[in-house]
Structure formats: C-alpha cells, structure tokens
Image: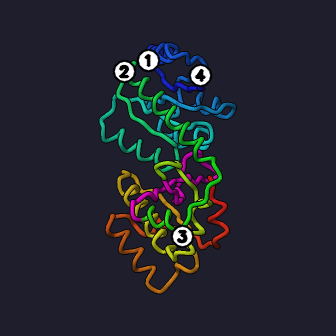
Amino acid sequence: MKVLIVEDSLLQATSIKILLKRYEISNVYTASNGEEAIKICQNHNFDLAFCDLQMPQIDGVSLLASSQAMRSIKRVVILSAMASSALESTQNMCVLIGYQHVEVIRKPVKDSHIQRLLSSHSLSNTVNAIQSLPVVLNDKQVQLAFEKNWFVNAYQSQHDVNKTQAVGVELLARLMHPELGLLTPLHFMESVRRLNLLDKLFYNVLEQGLKDISKLREPLGFSINIEQSTLRIDVADKIINLCNEYNVSPSLLTLEITEHETFLLDTK
C-alpha cells in the first residue's frame, strides 16, 4: 500500500507515519504543501492520501481538484479542524470529481481511524477483483437493478487546459451490484436498450447528479450523454423542471449527443 501525507505540520505528519508503521505500511511519501504534493503526484500513484485543507501556497482543496492529484490518488482522507460544513462541501467536491473513496477526519488522526481506513481499503480491493470478471447482465438482472435502485453515478472531472482546477464533471452511469461490485455500461447497456429503458436510465443519472450538485456551495458545470432516441419535443421541459426542482441552473448542464457504441466504451 502506497500512501501520501500532505500536511504542513511536521508533528501531525510524523504522527500519521508512526500510526501507519504499526500496520507495516512504510511506503509513505510526505509533502508540506500542495505544490510539493503535485510534484510528487507527477511521478507516483497512491492508494491513499491524507490531505490537510489549510496549507500555504496551494491549499488542500486546490490540490485535490488538480489533474495531477486526480490521476495519482485513488482514495482521499481530508484532514482539518475546520467547521463541519466546510469539510462536507470539500468531501462532496471530491466525490463529484471522481475519487473512489473520500473520508473526513477531524484532527488529530487516531489509531481507530487507521484501522477503519485499512478495513475499507481491503473491502474495496475485493470488490475491484470481482468487478474485473467478464460478466454481462441479462434482462431480468437489469430490471431488478432498476427496481432495487442499484444504478449510481460516477463523476469524471473536466479540466480547462490552462488551469489545474476542475471546471466541471461528466455524469456517468454505473451499476452497483451487491455481488459483482461496480459495473460499467459495458456490462448492462445492451439489456437497457433491449428493454427500452434508455430514457429511464438517462433521467436516473440526471436526477442523481442534480441531487449531488445541489449540495455544493459553488456552482459546477456538468455534462451527460444522451442518445438521439431520448431527444424528443418534451425533453427540454423535463430537464428544466428537474433542474428547478433541485435549484440547479440549467445553464450549467451540457447534453452530449452520442451513439450507443460510445456508451459501451465508457469504462473509465
């Protein structure tokens, strides 16, 4: 397990390293600010990163939203003594832009926190191993997935080429199967098509995205794939009504018209 600690307090960083060493985790890198962390992320990938929010130069929020960190880090632990509302906002941002697992820990980090994180990491590895199996769901399984609300969203960040911060997110359909783990459209889209449930999936993804985006303090642009078959006269009214329901400006939304082959290639 490879870990990055981004913390401007040497005492706090050392304390976390000592706790990790108790569990035989010694492949640990440290950075005292976001700028140092970005340089490290350019050359390394990490299973887990502890990140303080209040740091000099590049702060924790800007670091986590950077393309370098997002490519390098799988799971994030946000460290701070800030108010819970600010922490929740940052946690929501990290989830939206695609981090696999995001947790908030109020300083100081304790042994019980490390135990919980390691248990979560072990469970996630098991799920990922199951996910790699070449499985395609049949129609009954997909129908059950709609009934049981197993469809979830993944969020792929979108970046301005001139900035390190994310400027928006793409909403992607996923299916969280209780036994098979997190599945991409490759595993379920053909059944969705056969069952004529493309519209239902589209509005499912859209509404989940609006729920999540409405929790953010700052507006964030977002896009969603839509097939030509879903484009009808009433689609604009339905989308605007949903946006108004969650108090999200429709101007933040971009619809990307696509063919079904594009959905099947979505395995990010």
Q: What residue is pinned by disc 4?
A: 29
Assess whether mark 2 and mark 1 are in contact (beta carbons under 8 angstroms).
yes
Label number found at residue 192: 3
At x 48%, y 24%, the residue is: 7
Q: Which residue is denoted by mark 1 in the rendering?
A: 12
Q: SS class of the residue under badge 2? A: loop
Residue at disc 1, secondary structure: helix
Amino acid type, residue under disc 1 in the picture: Gln
Amino acid type, residue under disc 3 in the picture: Val
Residues shaded magenta: 147-176
On whether residue 84 falls in the magenta region, the answer is: no
Q: CA distance from mark 1 to mark 3?
A: 50 Å
Looking at the image, is mark 1 or mark 3 nearer the viewer? 3
The CA distance from mark 3 to mark 2 is 47 Å
Mark 2 to mark 4 CA distance (whole Å): 19 Å
Image point (48%, 69%), residue name: 202
